[in-house]
Image (cartoon, helix red, strand yellow):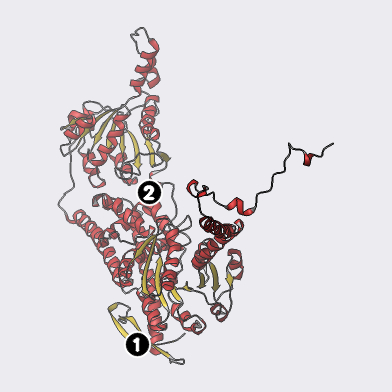
């Protein structure tokens, strides 16, 4: 038997050589028999040369690319040393580590455990840290301790071209400090991340990062290093704002210092959430929460080391004083008029001053349910639809709005949409507006009253309510009409109604804690406070009151039933304080800056919301809420206490600078000098050069 290998059907095929796998076939023109031996030799030589190039190990290409990519990644990473590893230093370190940078840290306090948890190398000795030759030294100290820290930092152990970066909330002070203290070889970058652990806890996207390249060498490596550091914040989505240190401090005094000042004044008031918070009050509570987390040293640094802050504090003080004078000036006029005026109180003769008391037992009117049951309906074929239509019509109200200004029109729009009939009267002619809204407008209030509305809704100002009510022809109304007010104070209208309306009238005191601005996108979740002061026990009167309240409930309002006294106590602590701060800030003429913080945006929105209301509304909150005066006094005391705290510290600094014996070497510094009188009043400020003792 023949072996398989010798069978003619199994001719062994020679294995292709490595050279044949990589060789390229000759073109037909060169592979013909007509080619010369010399040509063939040249082609073979060329093929052999290609073989040597193409026979590299395939795995080597992958390893080489990986090595290149790794080298590139390593070249983009930085070794960053954070000096001052407190809350803010740890806050920044977390993001640096996530970006793959090597982070070292040093602090007076032992934060080694926190560093270990973050993947940071902690050094208790600054010499050891500096001998690691970090590329970037990031100063995360407080403003007050920055000079001291920089003085004992062992600069001689660093590379001479190290990049020094600060993140202080003021910029001219560290700029001058770095330029005067550090050798010329060091690169300098002044920055201000305008956010912190609280405001940046959900990410840095859209938050401002301000920087000024004070001194960066021209070598490509030094320029690249600076850009790589800034790139950390840019990749996180920060809004990168390049601006001079002087510009920053001018804008920051208006935004950051004022924001912190307002936050600390309100914190001193001990503001708390109430059952009837307005949107404006919620923003103030958020502002207090954001600023209270920062140390007083930070706030004091904003005041002490930003030469623009003193001017802003003085402007805020003047604005508050101007507002108090405006309030008390009006109050003085009222008191003078009451004491010395010649019977200037409006006397209105009304036909029905002594309307007999409405007897509930002797009422001839049937109850609401009886009225519906006793109707003789003429029912068409579809009885069910007609019954529902008739019942729906009985649920609708005829509501007369007295005072058809912005707020009256604002309410009318929704009341009409709910299918109720709306009548309106006002001293000014709003007939065109009423027609557009589907409201019947009356030029004569007697004509309106003779239409016998179910509800009289008073939308007048607080100051004019008494005059309007005293002149109102109540004798032309049904004797059980429901009177409703929507004033921002509640005890005043409650007492006014009880004293001047006949016993037969129902009384409902309400406060929609929103208006055309805050309620322009709907009333859902907005607070509506009410107190059923006097509602007859008959079913139709109870139902009428509930149907009126149902307008707001169906719009999604948060319905809060509370006594008028409770309302005014809460409102003085929330609404009056909110309007007061809004009007004080309005007098400052605050404007948006290129470096707005979230807190400053809150203040700008507060000004916008409160400035839209008339001063009469604000004055009414003060004049007709017995709790408002106490709140104003507390606000005044809180502001005065804060000023004393600031100037008390300042006085201590000046005393130390002027009178202490210089036991250590004295340092010549240029700082803003404040001249104080004996009672602590600021007389002037100037830039003086004086000797200070090292701590």
Q: Is residue 481 in view from this perspective?
A: no
Give the quadrant of residue 685: bottom left
Q: Is residue 311 above or below residue 485?
A: below
Residue at 26%, 62% (x, y): give it.
588
Q: Is residue 485 above or below residue 153?
A: above
Q: Is residue 185 left or right of residue 313?
A: right
Residue 499 at x, y = what percent? Answer: 29, 40
The secondary structure type at the circle numbered 2 is helix
Q: Which residue is mark 2?
A: 279
Residue at 44%, 62% (x, y): give it.
233
Q: Is residue 245 above or below residue 364?
A: below
Mark closest to the chain's N terminus, 2 or 1: 2
Viewer-nearest residue: 7 or 372? 7
Q: In the rendered view of the protein, which quadrant contains the N terminus?
A: top right
Give the quadrant of residue 268: bottom left
Residue at 52%, 63% (x, y): give it.
73
Q: Which residue is mark 1?
A: 690
Residue 689 at x, y = what percent? Answer: 32, 86
Q: How many numbered marks have been drawn onto this rendered protein structure? A: 2
């Amino acid at each position: 038997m023949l072996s398989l290998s010798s069978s003619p059907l199994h001719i062994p095929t020679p294995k292709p050589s490595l050279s044949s796998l990589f060789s390229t076939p000759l073109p037909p023109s060169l592979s013909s028999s007509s080619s010369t031996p010399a040509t063939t030799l040249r082609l073979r030589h060329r093929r052999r040369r290609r073989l040597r190039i193409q026979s590299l190990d395939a795995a080597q290409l992958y390893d080489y690319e990986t090595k290149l990519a790794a080298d590139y990644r390593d070249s983009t990473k930085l070794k960053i040393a954070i000096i001052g590893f407190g809350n803010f230093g740890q806050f920044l370190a977390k993001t640096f580590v996530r970006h793959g940078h090597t982070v070292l840290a040093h602090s007076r306090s032992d934060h080694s455990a926190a560093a270990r948890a973050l993947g940071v190398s902690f050094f208790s000795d600054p010499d050891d840290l500096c001998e690691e030759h970090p590329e970037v030294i990031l100063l995360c100290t407080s403003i007050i301790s920055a000079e001291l820290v920089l003085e004992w930092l062992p600069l001689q152990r660093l590379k001479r071209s190290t990049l020094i970066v600060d993140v202080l909330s003021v910029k001219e002070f560290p700029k001058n400090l770095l330029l005067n203290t550090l050798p010329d070889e060091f690169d300098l970058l002044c920055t201000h991340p305008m956010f912190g652990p609280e405001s940046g806890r959900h990410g840095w996207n859209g938050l401002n990062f301000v920087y000024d390249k004070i001194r960066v060498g021209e070598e490509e490596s030094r320029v690249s290093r600076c850009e790589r550091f800034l790139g950390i914040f840019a990749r996180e989505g920060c809004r990168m704002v390049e601006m001079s240190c002087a510009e920053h401090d001018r804008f920051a005094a208006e935004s950051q210092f004022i924001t912190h000042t307002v936050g600390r004044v309100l914190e001193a008031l001990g503001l708390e959430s109430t059952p009837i918070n307005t949107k404006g009050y919620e923003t103030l509570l958020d502002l207090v929460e954001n600023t209270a987390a920062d140390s007083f040293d930070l706030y004091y640094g904003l005041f002490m080391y930003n030469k623009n802050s003193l001017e802003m504090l003085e402007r805020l003080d003047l604005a508050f004083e101007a507002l108090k004078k405006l309030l008390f000036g009006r109050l003085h006029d009222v008191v003078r008029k009451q004491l010395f005026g010649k019977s200037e109180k409006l006397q209105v003769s009304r036909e029905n001053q002594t309307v007999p008391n409405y007897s509930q037992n002797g009422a001839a009117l049937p109850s609401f349910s009886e009225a519906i049951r006793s109707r003789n309906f003429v029912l068409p074929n579809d009885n069910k639809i007609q019954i529902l239509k008739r019942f729906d019509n009985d649920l609708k109200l005829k509501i007369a709005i007295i005072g058809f200004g912005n707020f009256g029109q604002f309410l009318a729009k929704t009341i009409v949409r709910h299918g109720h009939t709306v009548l309106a009267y006002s001293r000014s002619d709003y007939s065109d507006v009423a027609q557009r809204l589907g409201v019947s407008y009356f030029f004569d209030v007697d004509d309106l009253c003779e239409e016998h509305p179910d509800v009289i809704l008073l939308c007048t100002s607080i100051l004019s309510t008494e005059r309007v009510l005293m002149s109102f022809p109540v004798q032309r109304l049904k004797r059980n009409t429901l009177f409703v007010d929507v004033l921002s104070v509640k005890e005043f209208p409650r007492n006014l109604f009880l004293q001047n309306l006949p016993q037969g009238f129902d009384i409902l005191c309400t406060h929609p804690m929103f208006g055309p601005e805050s309620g322009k996108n709907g009333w859902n979740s907005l607070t509506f406070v009410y107190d059923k002061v006097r509602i007859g026990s008959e079913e139709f009167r109870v139902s009428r009151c509930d149907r009126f309240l149902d307008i707001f409930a169906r719009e999604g309002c948060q319905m809060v039933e509370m006594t008028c006294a409770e309302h005014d106590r809460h409102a003085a602590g929330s609404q009056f304080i909110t309007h007061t701060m809004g009007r004080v800030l309005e007098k400052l003429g605050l404007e948006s800056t290129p470096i707005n913080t979230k807190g400053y945006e809150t203040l700008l929105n507060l000004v916008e919301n409160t400035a839209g209301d008339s001063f009469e509304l604000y004055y009414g909150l003060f004049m007709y809420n017995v709790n408002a005066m106490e709140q104003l006094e507390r606000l005044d005391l809180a502001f005065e206490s804060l000023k004393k705290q600031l100037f008390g510290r300042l006085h201590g600094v000046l005393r130390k600078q002027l009178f202490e014996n210089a036991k250590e070497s004295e340092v010549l510094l240029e700082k803003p000098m404040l001249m104080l009188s004996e009672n602590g009043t600021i007389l002037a400020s100037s830039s003086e050069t004086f000797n200070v003792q090292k701590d």
